[in-house]
Amino acid sequence: LNPIRDGAVLPILHLNGYKINNPAILARISHEELKSLFEGYGWTPYFVEGSDPDTMHQVMAATLETCINEIQSIQHTARTNNIPARARWPMIVLRSPKGWSGPKEVDGHKVEGFWRAHQVPMSNIKDNPAHLEKLETWLRSYQPEVLFDDTGKLQPALKALMPKGNRRMSANPHANGGLLRKALRMPDYHAYALALEAPAKVTAPNTKPLGKFLRDVMRQNMHNFRVFGPDENSSNKLDDIYEVSKKTWLADYLPEDADGGELSPDGRVMEMLSEHTVEGWLEGYLLTGRHGFFSTYESFVHVIVSMFNQHAKWLAMSKEVPWRAPISSLNLLITSTVWRQDHNGFTHQDPGFLDIVVNKSPEVTRIYLPPDVNCLLSVANHCLSSTDYINVIVCDKQKHLQYLDIESAVEHCTKGLGMWDWACNDAGHEPDLVMACAGDIPTKEALAATAILREHFPELKIRFINVVDLYKLTPKTEHPHGLSDRDFDSLFTTNKPILFNFHGYPYLIHRLTYRRTNHDNLHVRGYKEKGSINTPLELAIQNEIDRFSLAIDAINRIPSLQAIGGHVQEKLRNRQIECCNYAYEHGVDMPEEDDWTWPF
Amino acid sequence: LNPIRDGAVLPILHLNGYKINNPAILARISHEELKSLFEGYGWTPYFVEGSDPDTMHQVMAATLETCINEIQSIQHTARTNNIPARARWPMIVLRSPKGWSGPKEVDGHKVEGFWRAHQVPMSNIKDNPAHLEKLETWLRSYQPEVLFDDTGKLQPALKALMPKGNRRMSANPHANGGLLRKALRMPDYHAYALALEAPAKVTAPNTKPLGKFLRDVMRQNMHNFRVFGPDENSSNKLDDIYEVSKKTWLADYLPEDADGGELSPDGRVMEMLSEHTVEGWLEGYLLTGRHGFFSTYESFVHVIVSMFNQHAKWLAMSKEVPWRAPISSLNLLITSTVWRQDHNGFTHQDPGFLDIVVNKSPEVTRIYLPPDVNCLLSVANHCLSSTDYINVIVCDKQKHLQYLDIESAVEHCTKGLGMWDWACNDAGHEPDLVMACAGDIPTKEALAATAILREHFPELKIRFINVVDLYKLTPKTEHPHGLSDRDFDSLFTTNKPILFNFHGYPYLIHRLTYRRTNHDNLHVRGYKEKGSINTPLELAIQNEIDRFSLAIDAINRIPSLQAIGGHVQEKLRNRQIECCNYAYEHGVDMPEEDDWTWPF
């Protein structure tokens, strides 16, 4: 926290000594250790300890006063001197007995100040007169006759102590952040588009223009927008953001940091190699009415699965509560994806987060797989303007083939999925094959397979479909984005073979489509836990999402080719082996295949 | 760590100051804060700091000596006095420059001692003579002419410095724990069985006898078996274990702990409310050749998804490495499940971990859903004897209806899935319906639905199938446990309606079965994110896995009932409403329904 710019937090650790059955660890280390721990975390701890209620109330009040004075003094000094030094903010350790003021003991067992106070301190009240008496004594100890009048209402003098309006804890607008939320001022995302002369001819890093777009979103919203990431935004190629705002940094600063360190106490970019800390920051920021964008490595987004689940549940419930105002969506860019782990390998290959996302309420979950720069811009623009969703965007940071100019990308992403007419040759005919795909590398391989098939079998009619909005695949009854069955059948046909080349584990596509008419003809390729430190094409071949495997499979599936396609299949298998051998020997893919572009 | 009984660990924090692009946070706080932090964590930190290699080697050697002496002294004192006091073990903070002894700077940018040293310090060596020269100077600084002879071999005097045999880091048997592993001595699990006079007549808590079984496994394996859990084993009803071994506890001990605290410095039960810490302990314990059993709440097992993924990947790869000896399986009991969150509610309802498990290699993953006490014993016995798997067992801790005596349970679990003949009335006939289920509550509801249908339509022939080993559902080509298509078709028929009542999210069953002949007739019920603080039957009704919903659906699916079943459906819908109203009013389920037992 920057004491000039930011607010303050006064954490209170209520250390009542026990969990449901065990002592709390921090309650059983020495005072010195506990003090050291919080000093090591950067705080100045104050201890409020005891069990006499009257004394404790006074000590707590005095300590709160001290802490608030200290916070104000830190802020005042920083704001007067204009030096945003890192402060050792105060915090309170409140040690009070668990089950405080409850029964001291029941049936000879200690209750107050022990874990037995955790749940029901006395059971079987109905049939145990001794327990009933203890319960009555306990409850009478709070002197209800003083607190309430004869009709059972709270005494007016006590009622008058309650805070009013927004000072009530439940009515604090920061606890209903949607009330404070202001829509982002958005730059026109068209301005960051990559100009393309023709589809699938050039490559570019997918996330770089997104960084420029986020930079200008930041520029126009310097009070309520932050960018979050456990991995450096530089590594994810979003570093243009630093032109406008640096990484928040209040710890020691060295002269060399000025050379590319991009650190500043004023920064609005939140980086820490701790996925769950970053997710926690972002959730807090959104819940209090602000906006954020989070990018993280695909394989390690699993660290926040549990937090994702709970946030999704929270959003789903909050939509059922009429007084809760919508908050900004949680925008999560999953990058450094499975198909481009050229030097990281098997540990970094895990596209399974999406399988968790689809378990959660369709009212709050959205999944996008933009295949190129312009689709990513269109999707990100849409997500940043939305509320009450978790938008999961999957897009790799490396250089990838570029497919759509910005107008086509906007049309395509607005539809969510669609035919790419330049890649289809079935207009006016029944297609022999539907080639479908979702994700950057799978799209490239599906396109290359389409080209191979058309080169070898010029009469073949292939329909090419790309999917950006994954939920389009599922029936409308299952998700608000779902295509109607009629539309789905028109696109995917009711009886032609479909090859679907997918970014993630293949089953997810079956899960989304198993109710569709033509599901029996749908054959999905995806990641199947085969991988090491491989070149992209090697990795694709191992998991059979490569152009050759797809073309070989298509020949098997298309009735007119089954008898005549064997020779082509053999050639393709040979080529696969050549490619693998080349990659093994040179450590990179064969340039002719790697530099492949759309030939028609 | 108990200094009398256990070994020791000397942690070394290598604080080289930077990550790929950012400073490390711990490198930029004051020396005092860093020292406080590790003292707060309970260590005695020693600092080795500097950049002159010769000095640093000496300081490091001396510090290592000091630390090892200190460790030995702690152990000696504890073992002499026989007082297992908690020790403040030494640890080392090694601060050295990142990219130490590499180029100081390149192109005017600092490299050694800065984040720029993280990846390739100098690029484009081929075309940049200045970089090439710098590279050569750098590499020559290590004096290869002194280290190697004329043929490029390491000098014999240097080679002689290398440790031999098991002292080599890669040959340390603790790093190939399977070499040290001894199979557990197992008590006969039949001895813990629940005696049943008839199926589905009585209820019992499912995990309680497992606790007795684990107690006796512990008793016979007091040197290489531990039980792990973030939640108290008492809460999970495994507390009989404490008769043999308590919870490891070396922090402060109070007199009241003697009354049911179950704490001891000698304990072999590892409890800490931190799922990832516990998972880390368990992985370390298994990897070094020991055995363990981990129980945790279903909803919060998501905290360790990322660790599960990496352990599964590690196991899959280790099976491909011939010199790696098999290690004990990671046995994970998922309890406090979605269907019994009577007072915890929506946040505690999440059976989605299984959707992650099925993404991982079929060579290393196993999933079991034992529906009752005896099946759980049979499954647990099998899992504790296995190697190189992650065994996920899903079984709730509450009281549940009991189905199988121990002989039947062993047969059933060995087959993995099967018909329960006492619940079937289709012997000698074609069934009108296959009622299938997996999981405790879903099994009870499926049985009750079967009874409702038979009571109303006495001629109806229903086949009842329960699934324990989930992978039986998938084709043999996909998982070694998969049933052959022939067996699957015989059991599930090729053309009759199947209702499948499932513990988890329903799609998982489709995922496993979508290639089966009769998949188009398979209708799955499961959790669909509907829940709050509900009674079990209310929760079942909301997610449509209850007896009434199943019976209503069966009437829709069975051709002979479609026309005549409407009146019964109406009655069942009324009963559903009555049950919900009763639960709302009384906070518990209607006793007639809750105490339901098998009527035939």
Image (cartoon, coloured by chain):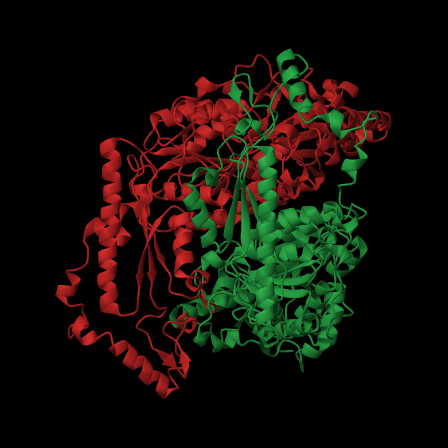
Chain colours: A green, B red
Name the residue at 44% across, 67% down.
Answer: A580
- Which one is nearer the viewer's eye here, B568 or A374? A374
Residue A198 lies in quadrant: bottom right
Residue B50 located left or right of residue A384: left
The residue sitting at the left extreme is: B157
Residue B251 lies in quadrant: top left
Q: Number of callouts in the render? A: 0
**Relative vertical location of residue B377 with respect to residue B312 in this rendering, above or below:** above
- The N terminus of chain A lies in quadrant: bottom right
Question: At which x and y percent is residue B15?
Answer: 38, 61
Residue A287 lies in quadrant: bottom right
Question: At which x and y percent is residue B115?
Answer: 43, 71
- On the question of residue A565 being in view, the answer is no
Question: At which x and y percent is residue B194?
Answer: 52, 17
Question: At which x and y percent is residue B22?
Answer: 47, 68
- On the question of residue B242 being in view, the answer is yes
- Which one is nearer the viewer's eye here, B566 or B95? B95
Residue B306 located left or right of residue A447: left
Residue A577 located left or right of residue B169: right
**Relative vertical location of residue B568 with respect to residue A316 in this rendering, above or below:** above
- The C terminus of chain A lies in quadrant: bottom right
- Which one is nearer the viewer's eye here, B298 or A47? A47
